[in-house]
Image (cartoon, rainbow, N blue to C red):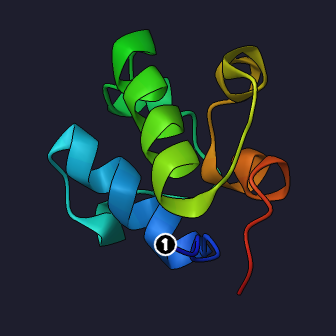
Amino acid sequence: MTAVALTLEQLRADVADILGEDPEEIPVDENLVDYGLDSVRLMSLAAAWRRDHGVTVEFADLAERPALESWAPLLGVTG
């Protein structure tokens, strides 16, 4: 199976899904901890992105700045 590139839309959808929110409710520039993101959910997201998109990123890098706009360059987000 070929990994599909991760987009900002997919990133937002994945985060919204794990938090039980609508994707439109997830701002790109706000701290996701304020929306209920915890370390277990963050590890689950990182594992899913590794599995589904071939993206490898350090947990600490994601935890340091938990906002979509900060993660996008770390995850090689396209579009």
Farthest-out residue, bottom: 79
The relative height of residue 74 versus residue 6 in the rendered view (above or below) is above
- Which residue is most to the left? 20
In what quadrant of the picture does the C terminus appear?
A: bottom right
Sort mark 1 into few (<14), some (14-19) or many (20+) by Cα contacts within 10 Å: few
**Residue at the location (46% across, 71% down)?**
10
Residue 52, image x, y percentages:
47, 58
- Depth order, front residue of 50/76: 50
Q: Is residue 71 left or right of residue 27?
A: right
Q: Residue at x 19, y 53 (%)?
A: 21
What amino acid is found at the position of numbered circle 1 in the picture? Met
* Residue 24 occupies quadrant: bottom left
Q: Is residue 29 left or right of residue 25?
A: right
User: Which residue is under mark 1?
Assistant: 1
Mark 1 lies on a secondary structure that is loop
3 or 32, which is in the foreground? 3
Horizontal side of 42 relative to 56 (left or right) equals: left
Q: Quadrant of residue 66?
A: top right
